[in-house]
Amino acid sequence: MCARKTPNLTNYFSGAKQSQHLSAAEEEIQQLKAEIEELRSKNSSDLELQLKELRKQLESHSGILSISLEQIEPNPEQPRQTFLPESIESMSRSLSRDGQLQPVILIQRGNHLLIFDGERRWRSAKILGWQTIQAVIIPEPVSLHRKALLTSLHREDLNPLDKAEAILREISTITELDVQDIPRLLSTVIRRLNSQKRIKPVFELVTADTKKQEQELDILDISESERAVLRVLLDLQLNPASIDANIFPMLSLAEDLKIAIRSGLKGVHAMALQKLSAKNLGLSEQKAKSIREKTTQKVISEKLSAIATRKLVTEVLASQSQSSVINDTNTQDVAQTSHRLQKLSLESLKKANPSELLQFKEVLCQKLAEIEQVLKQN
């Protein structure tokens, strides 16, 4: 098995300032592709060091520019879509106290300046009311989304929902498969390989070179679509089984749980809370959502662990089950009473004592008023 070499981000951008478009030179493009392939093996600390070196190189070519915040736009292909308020506040305090220590890196796309690195600084500067920010500018790289994805996957702790959406987009872009089909295809092939006890060789391909990956995929009894999905995941140095079990399930979460994840809820907690569904609770979607949101807030405010969250969900389900039993009993009582009234014949009423009939009428009128009150509330 051939391990991938460590990439060098400084080399990735070598010669960037000498060319307005990287596609102008075939040799430079090939070098760019090779370095993108190598990027996947970087860990967090190495990438931060490389980005620091990249800034130095860019500064030496063009110097640091003072760019108006209004001219800068977020990168729409940035995998990270969630920026927690506390993270922005922390950066704002740092900028206010120490100033801007490092320039942001911007991508020139026509007349637009997109953020390649430094969106937190840009957002924080806007909150502080800054008019400009220090930046260095590069031409747009080939395969911008792929480059941003690779960088984010191995440098930043993306929340699982952002990660799932970014990976799904990358697979769809490369394979042209419908985004709705990709999770199903992955799940199907993983289950089949597991049943065949052939999933371990696939896991071992994560750090293999492209040639080795293709050779091993040739051996597997899988469809072209399944192969395409596995190929992209392995190319991103991701374990397909882990993506199927831990990442893609985020895509099917209830919308309120997706919002909670973007606000800081952990994926494992969200998966536990997902069990509070309308079906499991035996309630309408609206009522189930209300219970789920209340439980989610409790998990967040009390900072419950994953184990404590699963226990809480079990308690909520059990409590609702007991309520359902009580409601079922009450429903049966009403039905039985209604049935007895229907069986009460006119002949029976004629034989009853007038005083008893008056008392019976009062009871009926009282119950009718209560029924009207209940119906108005519903």
Image: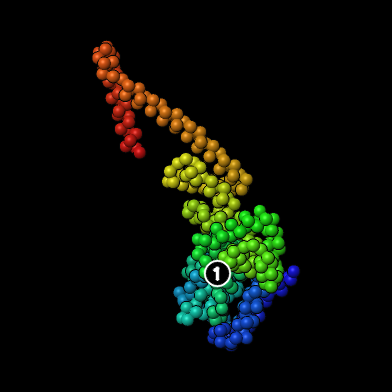
Q: Amino acid at mark 1?
A: Thr
- Residue located at (74% from left, 69% from top): 1
- Viewer-proximal residue among 332 and 104: 332
Q: Compare residues 243 and 185 and report the one nearer the observer.
A: 185
Q: Which residue lies at the image location 57% right of the left edge and 40% below the top edge?
A: 314
Going 35% across and 25% down the picture, which residue do you hit?
339
Which residue matches tag 1? 175
The x and y percentages for residue 141 are 56, 78
Q: Quadrant of the C terminus?
A: top left
Please, is residue 260 above or below residue 226 in the view? above
Rendering coords of residue 74 (x, y %) = 50, 71
The colour style of the image is: rainbow
Left or right: where does residue 198 sit relative to residue 81? right
Q: Position of residue 99 (x, y in %)?
A: 57, 71
Q: Is residue 183 above or below residue 132?
A: above
Observer-nearest of 339 and 306: 339
Task: Work out whether residue 188 or residue 82 is closer to the camera in this orientation and state it.
Answer: 188
